[in-house]
Image (spheres, rainbow, N blue to C red):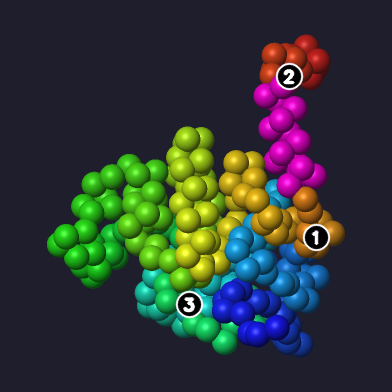
Amino acid sequence: MGLLAKPYLQRITALFGDDVDWERHPYRVPAVRDLSSLDFHPDVTFFIGENGAGKSTLLEAIALALGFSIDGGSRNVFNLNTAQEAAPLFQSLRLSKSFKTPRDRYFFRAESFHNVATRLDELDERSAASVKSLHARSHGEAFMSVLVDTFRGNGLYLLDEPEAALSPNRQLAALRVIDQLVRQESQFIIATHSPILLAYPNAKILLFDGTGITEVAYEDTEHYAVTRDFLNHYPKRLEQLLDQDADG
């Protein structure tokens, strides 16, 4: 079998030094503390878990190790000293990559997307013929613009909770665009809470919890089970949730 271009990012390995303070965030988080190595799917790998489980923390560390800005975006403009202070985990990661470098790269962070949009305008990265300023659009429209107009294919894309900007219909539209980009030799690593995005066929789903990181099937995720149960029984579930007498 010949060498394959994908996955562009094949594996990460954590090599923690003796100076790591295991009582300090993020090292005290089980998913980080017990991290040894992770292998990535050639197409789509999802990070899932409760808030604080470490999925966004690890995605950020991977992004920094790849040379992205701590705010996200496509340009390698992060300040090394700032990154070491704000997110030191990336220094412990060793990356195993494909022989082929992706043509396109982007790190999307919902919480800092405003900063990236501002930088794009200031640096005039978008040509006069391209779409209007991201600030002239809603958050969801701006993200879809990035997905459709900025991502060029043959790329490595890291997305941190992209559903924060998207309605359910836009999440379905995003799934279609992600699939189109996968067919154009792209690889995605996505931290998400969205049961819609998680449904992408044949994706690798990694669950971050108190036991570390484990691979799970889509229908075994809490996202799928809770959403399905609520939609199928929402009157009863609402009654149970909102019954103040039961809480007393």
The image quadrant where one finds the N terminus is bottom right
The part of the chain drawn in magenta is 218-233
How far apart are labels 1 and 3 at the CA level? Answer: 27 Å
Q: Amino acid at mark 1?
A: Thr
- Mark 1: few, some, or many residues within 10 Å (few <14, many ≥20)? few
Q: Nearer the viewer, residue 109 or 2?
A: 2
Can see residue 169? yes
Q: Earlier in the sequence, mark 2 or mark 1?
A: 1
Residue to which mark 3 is pinned: 102
Q: Residue 147, labelled with which disc?
A: none
Where does the image place residue 15, in percent across and percent down from the top left? 73, 84
Q: Nearer the viewer, residue 83 or 124?
A: 124
Residue to which mark 2 is pinned: 233
Position of residue 80 relative to residue 121, above or below, is: below
Tags 1 and 3 touching, CB below 8 Å = no
Where does the image place residue 192, in percent across and percent down from the top left? 60, 51
Q: Report whether 165 appears left or right of 192.
A: left
Position of residue 74 relative to residue 114, above or below, is: below
